């Protein structure tokens, strides 16, 4: 089976860290924070098997750029599938 490279943007890493800090520090639920972080990151990285998974976004100008979305827990993950020349 072919796999693809998945790259998480700095913004994604910052959002995941912020989510972890909020659940762990504000809600005082460190185990839930670890689980949420791991599950969302795994959902992102699972796009290496099926990068076109998910529905195209419905709004322009993003729809024409190929942005798609999938759900990971209660969060929306946006992805773009591109090929290199």
Image (cartoon, rainbow, N blue to C red):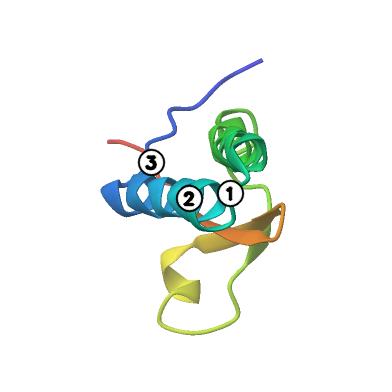
**Disc 1 designates what residue?**
28
Q: Quadrant of residue 27?
A: bottom right
Please indicate whether residue 60 sits to the left or right of residue 35 in the image.
left
Cα separation between marks 1 and 3: 27 Å
Percent x, y of residue 1: 66, 15
Q: How would you rate the neighbour count of disc 2 (Cα within 10 Å): few for under 14, some for 14-19, many for 20 or more?
A: few
**Disc 3 designates what residue?**
8
Q: Is residue 74 above or below residue 38?
A: below
Q: Nearer the viewer, mark 3 or mark 2?
A: 2
Give the residue at x 63% y 39%: 43
Dot 1: what SS?
loop
Query: Is residue 45 in view from this perspective?
Result: yes
Question: Decide: marks 1, 2 in contact (CB < 8 A)?
Answer: yes
Dot 2: what SS?
helix
Mark number displayed over residue 25: 2
Cα separation between marks 1 and 2: 5 Å
- Label 1 vs 3, first from the N-terminus: 3
As drawn, the residue found furthest toward the top would be 1
Q: Quadrant of the C terminus?
A: top left
Q: Is residue 65 above or below residue 34?
A: below
């Amino acid at each position: 089976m072919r796999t693809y490279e998945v790259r998480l943007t700095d913004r994604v890493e910052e959002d995941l860290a912020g989510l972890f800090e909020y659940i762990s520090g504000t809600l005082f639920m460190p185990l839930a924070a670890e689980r949420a972080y791991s599950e969302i990151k795994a959902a992102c990285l699972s796009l290496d098997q099926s990068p076109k998974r998910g529905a195209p976004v419905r709004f322009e100008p993003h729809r024409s750029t190929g942005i798609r979305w999938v759900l990971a827990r209660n969060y929306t993950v946006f992805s773009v599938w591109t090929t290199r020349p």
